[in-house]
Amino acid sequence: MGIEATDGDAARLCASCGICCDGSLFGRVDLETDAIETARKKKLRVVAGGRAFEQPCSAHAGAHGAERACAIYDERPRACRKFVCRLLARHEREGGALEPRLLAVRRTRELLAEVQAMSPEQARKSAAFAELTRRLEEDFARA
Ligand code: SF4
Ligand code: SF4
């Protein structure tokens, strides 16, 4: 969502990620009243009488097996424009090599897949769940 990236590196990071669009972090995203019509036109899955849309987001290109990016980028809702995760914020603040950030995304996606394949009981006791919880907090919470 925070694909508000101003430089090419940050845009690449978000395009490789989509964790804030695919349902990994959020079940629903708030919609403001003036955004409902566009959201409906763009076929977001609007719920709660227009107060929110559901994730995994139908505009998330990763949902269609393509690159992970927003298909309605220029018209995405305000909540999407405002979300910036800690990993992206750190990169924008500190700069440096992009590769370690891309690796953090890759590792988190691996852990998400691993944990989703487990039963809730197995997941709770697993090292993968502990690492995933730490990474989500350190890198993907709102900055
Ligand atoms: S509208 Fe775009 S930025 Fe917002 S959740 Fe969907 S894919 Fe992500
Ligand atoms: S979770 Fe962070 S890095 Fe990933 S798409 Fe969202 S803002 Fe970009």
Image (cartoon, rainbow, N blue to C red):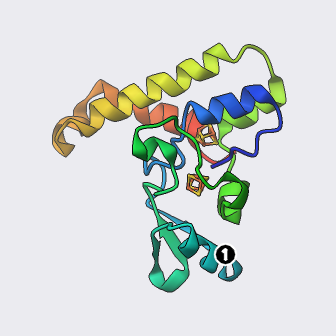
Q: Give the amino acid type for the residue marked by disc 1 in the picture.
A: Ala
Can you say which quadrant of the picture contains the C terminus?
top right
The image quarter containing residue 98 is top right
For the point 57% across and 40% down, the residue is: 140
Drawn side of residue 23 relative to residue 114, left or right:
right
The residue under label 1 is: 35
Residue 6 pos. (x, y %) = 83, 38
Residue 14 pos. (x, y %) = 63, 36
Bin the neighbour count of mark 1 within 10 Å (Cα to Cα): few under 14, some 14-19, many 20 and up. some
Count of numbered marks: 1
The image quarter containing residue 10 is top right
Residue 50 pos. (x, y %) = 53, 81
Picture layout, residue 108 above or below residue 29 = above
Residue placed most toward the observer, 107 or 34: 34
Residue placed most toward the observer, 106 or 71: 71
For the point 60% across and 34% down, the residue is: 15
